[in-house]
Amino acid sequence: VYFFHITTFLLVVAIWVFRHQVPYEVRSYFSIAFQGAIAVVGLYTHGVTAAGGAWIIGSAITATVLQGQRVGIFVLLTLLLMAVILAASFITGLLVPPIIVEAPSKALIQWMLYILNWVFLGGTTVIAVGYINQYFSETMTQLATKSHALEESQFEYFDLFENVADVIYRADLNGKIIRISPSSLEGLGYSPDEMIGTVLADYYVDPSKRSELAAKLQE
């Protein structure tokens, strides 16, 4: 048991030190296996205890967050199956593990109550975390899709703005030009740099048109 603890600690340190070189899949599955191994070793050495069940549920939750709901359910069922095997071995006397803190329980009803409790708590938690994880995943996918569509729309807008033959401009509520297409040089005789920051009404020859424009801008 102590060899297992020392080996696990060294592996955790190695994963942390080389985390940038180790792929995500390796790190995630190691975390799941690490917690699952603690749960099994805890049940093997201490018998039926709440601490062992906490590691079982924790391992299943970690698997759900890192690899999805299916992996979380698989990990939960695998660890529960191992708990059932250990329980049967303890109850029938086929297995006599090294005892560290307390003797492994031989009461069938105690094992049944604990395992059923782990099934209920672990199952409901994994399903809930799985749905939350799926919601965030779908939300991020939708945001990425909308962001990509917005980038494409902006690219098309800028491409049209830069290459259109007619003069296109944007102005604020005071009529000040914010942006104008390069075609202004050919159409109006002014470059965009000369016109940006100036008032749009100044380019109307007919004074009445200027007042009409000012009235529309105030609406």
Image (cartoon, helix red, strand yellow):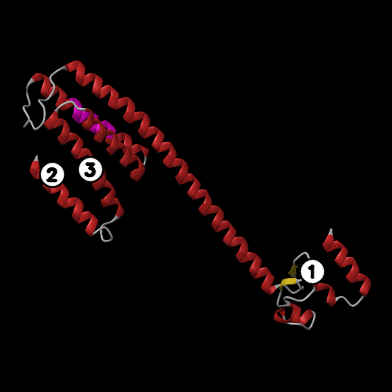
Picture disc at residue 33: 3
Left or right? Give the position of 153 relative to 173: left
Magenta part of the protein: which range? 76-84
Q: Is residue 140 magenta?
A: no
Q: Which residue is mark 2?
A: 5
In the rendered image, residue 58, in percent from the top left (x then y), is placed at 29, 37
User: 160 or 105, which lies in front?
Assistant: 105
| Residue drawn at the location 49% of the way across and 49% of the way down | 141
- Give the spatial CA distance, label 2 vs label 1: 74 Å
How many numbered discs? 3
- Determine whether the residue tagged by mark 2 lies in a helix, strand or loop: helix
Q: Which residue is mark 1?
A: 175
Amino acid at dot 2:
His
User: 11 or 198, which lies in front?
Assistant: 198
Amino acid at dot 1:
Gly
User: 36 or 26, which lies in front?
Assistant: 36
- Determine whether the residue tagged by mark 3 lies in a helix, strand or loop: helix
Picture disc at residue 203: none
**Nearer the N terminus, badge 2 or badge 1?**
2
In the rendered image, residue 79, in percent from the top left (x then y), is placed at 23, 33
Quarter occupied by the N terminus: top left
Q: Quadrant of residue 115?
A: top left
